[in-house]
Image: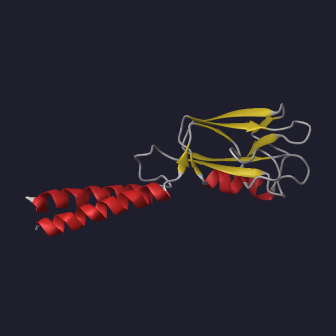
Amino acid sequence: MARMAEILLQFVVLVAIAEVATAEKTCSICTVGAPGGSWNLQTNLTRWAESNIFYPGDIILFNYDSSQHNVLEVTKTDFDSCTATNPIAAHTDGSGVINLSAVGTRYFICGFNGHCAAGQKVQINVFTSPTGVSTPNSGVVSVRASAGLVVGLAAILAF
């Protein structure tokens, strides 16, 4: 029985290491594109958004040269088609502070001609709290639950 408990404990340690290695970065106040880029044509904004987890109450900041870019919040349809004619909100002064106040998906594009089509657009997915199962880390949450179960079983088997 002691050998089984030792094996289970080793498994738990490996799961914890894997969890840390695969955890996604989160931030409360995120500058779009940072740290390696910004709201521009060179930054892979899709990759940036996918590398962050957003929750209600988080803030995203857009910093840009207003003579070359703007930030338009748009519908999914306008995001997909890069249509800038009917934005939900427009930021044109070189910065935009967006409070992600609710769970859901928000869409932002640059309204300058050709910029959205060239990739200057970002979809921000806002998820429920970190303990909820509807987050993109639901696999990690499952791993945590499984690790907890294994620790419990190891403790029982050790006695």
The one nearer the camera, 28 or 85, is 28
- x 56%, y 41%: residue: 27
| Relative image position of residue 158 (x, y in whole percent) | 11, 60
Which residue does the image show at 42% across and 57% down from the upper left? 19
Indicate how the structure is coloured in the image. secondary structure
Is 110 above or below relative to 1? above
Quadrant (top left, top right, bottom left, bottom right) of the C terminus: bottom left
Please, which residue is most extreme toward the left here? 159
In the rendered view, does 40 fall on the left or right side of 146?
A: right
Can you say whether 108 is above or below 142 in the image? above
Residue depicted at 75% across the width and 58% down the height: 80
Count the numbered circles shown.
Answer: 0
Residue 85 percent coordinates (x, y): 86, 46
Q: Is residue 121 left or right of residue 118?
A: left
Foreground of the two, 140 or 56: 140
- Quadrant of image for the N terminus: bottom left
Residue 106 falls left or right of residue 90: left
Image coords of residue 25 (percent x, y): 55, 49
In the rendered image, the vertical position of residue 154 relative to residue 95, given as above or below: below
Residue 144: percent from the left, percent from the top? 35, 55
